[in-house]
Image (cartoon, rainbow, N blue to C red):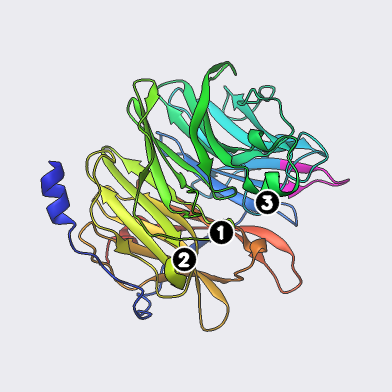
Amino acid sequence: MSAVRYAVMVLLVHCAGCAERHEAAPLPIQPLGLDARPGSALPNLVADDRGRVYLSWVEPSGGGTHAMKFSVLGESGWGSPRTIAYGADWFVNWADFPSMAALRDGTLAAHWLRKSGPATYAYDVQIAFSPDQGTTWSEAVVPHTDATATEHGFVSLAPWGEDRLFAVWLDGRHFEGLKGEAERHAAMTLHYGILRTNGALEEEGEIDARTCSCCQTAAAALREEVLVAYRDRSEAEIRDVSTQRYAGGGWSGPASIREDGWRIDACPVNGPSIDVFNEQVGIAWYTGARDEPRVYLRFSGNGGRNYGSEIRVDDGRPIGRVDVELMPDGSGLVLWMEQAKAGSEIRLRRVLPDGRSAGHWTVTATRGDRATGFPRMVLIADLLVLAWTDVDSKGNKSVKTARVPVASLQAAP
């Protein structure tokens, strides 16, 4: 499809947030049991090319130690949990959570965060590989070579080609040794690394020299290219979402996905999400510009080179914490958190490229505080799989998961 035809198709901007809309027919959610320890949290989901779904999470394992576990979804539910790594010196944070990736050659990759010094935000990225579906894992490698005891986190992993892993992270190396006013004016940066499955670091470099300090990044591969989305930061403290493309060994430079003009003097801890299907791209993000919280979605039909108009997804009172998945029919699923009449909810909406959508589905009621973290989802041929952190009235955490038949999602709009 030409860029011109695609732009014409998506001229309609759909404002879902002007007034709260109705809830769609109840979502046929099928809860999935998980054998995780009390206190489990920070779930993440990924699928491989064969349709296998992997759930990862972090749980306390006694004596101040944490473990990163994972499980594979089978016909009857989640398989027995397996340990990827554990340690007493991890950095465990509600917004900066570990993840997995499934490479095309069958290799699994995982990342977590390990303290590198006494400062609160001194930690390194750790990446390990498994050649045997998670039975054994390699020694962890660090994709950044600066060796500073500063912040390195908010990682995105994207399988690239047959056997390479593209990693993107926020990098605080320029904060080393700074205090007071100098530290306040220093800039977080966005870096990347390309790793082989044997742990060899093939390439490393800086993508952007000034970014927001603690918003999640997003990355996805499109054949020989990689598309990255992140919250940028101007000298005037405008913190809108930018994208960049890695192609031919170089970066395109930042391009704003939309000039929201969100001026904020602190990090909102609310990064974008990106998904690709063939040449189609979907990017979802949260903004609080002009004191009007919103969640938007934009589609591209040509690999992110041009985008259609923004489509508003929320119901008027979003918290954000978005995730997006593209469906083969060209529509997009957006998962986000919204304030409700009583507490907060995790909501899901299907949106067509022309902006049409129906009412939202409520996945679950939840708390809107930090303890609930970020809900995640992944789509395979016939199932949508969801994961979130549940927090009970006593503050106890546990990872919850569910699946939804894709056929029920295609009924709306």
- The numbered disc on residue 149 is none
Residue placed under numbered mark 2 in the picture:
288
- The numbered disc on residue 35 is 3
Q: CA distance from mark 3 to mark 1?
A: 33 Å
Q: Are marks 1 and 2 in contact (CB under 8 Å)?
A: yes
Q: Are marks 3 and 2 in contact (CB under 8 Å)?
A: no
Task: Give whichever of discs 3 and 1 has the lower sequence position.
Answer: 3
Nearer-the-camera pick, 381 or 265: 265
Residue placed under numbered mark 1 in the picture:
268
* Badge 1 amino acid: Pro
For the view shown, which residue lies furthest in the bottom direction? Answer: 341
Residue drawn at the location 66% of the way across and 54% of the way down: 94
Task: Give whichever of discs 1 and 2 has the lower sequence position.
Answer: 1
- For the N terminus, give its image quadrant: top left
Segment colored magenta: 58-67
Image check: 220 left or right of 281? right
Question: Is residue 327 on the magenta stretch?
Answer: no
- Where residue 147 appears, as percent x and y from the top left, is 70, 25
* Badge 3 amino acid: Asp
Image check: 308 left or right of 173? left
* Badge 2 amino acid: Gly
Q: Secondary structure at mark 3?
A: loop
Image check: 11 left or right of 156? left
For the view shown, which residue lies furthest in the right direction? Answer: 63
Q: Are marks 3 and 1 in contact (CB under 8 Å)?
A: no
Q: CA distance from mark 3 to mark 2?
A: 38 Å
Nearer-the-camera pick, 283 or 152: 152
- For the C terminus, give its image quadrant: bottom left
